[in-house]
Amino acid sequence: MRSGYLDAQVGASSLAGLYAHVEAGARLTERLGLFAFGRATRQESMAGAGVRYTFGW
């Protein structure tokens, strides 16, 4: 089961002001996926990546 997603947001926060956020990911198996994100405000920007494992009953 391979699928992916792209999430993009633009908004305003009382603390950070205007911001933009982008996240993209891919599901490698039913429970395991990889993702990366980026976020920018006027004061700072950040980026990261991770592994997402989902579980449930």
Image (tube, rainbow, N blue to C red):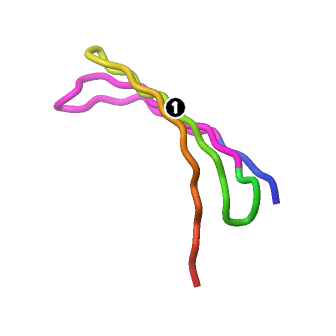
Residue span colored magenta: 6-26
Residue 11, compared with residue 54, is above or below; it is above
Residue sticking out furthest to the left: 15
Quarter the N terminus occupies: bottom right
Q: Quadrant of residue 57?
A: bottom right
Residue sticking out furthest to the top: 42
Q: Is residue 23 magenta?
A: yes
Q: Position of residue 18 (x, y in %)?
A: 30, 22
Q: Position of residue 17 (x, y in %)?
A: 24, 23
Residue at screen point 54% across, 44% down: 50
| Helix, strand or loop status at disc 1 | strand
Count of labels in the image: 1
Q: Is residue 49 magenta?
A: no
Amino acid tagged 1: Val
Viewer-proximal residue among 37 and 7 = 37
Residue 15, compared with residue 51, is above or below; it is above
Residue at screen point 24% across, 32% down: 13
Give the residue pinned by disc 1.
22
In this image, 52 relative to 33: left or right? left
Viewer-proximal residue among 40 and 18 = 40
| Local crowd size for mark 1, using a 10 Å CA cut-off: few (<14), some (14–19), many (≥20) | some
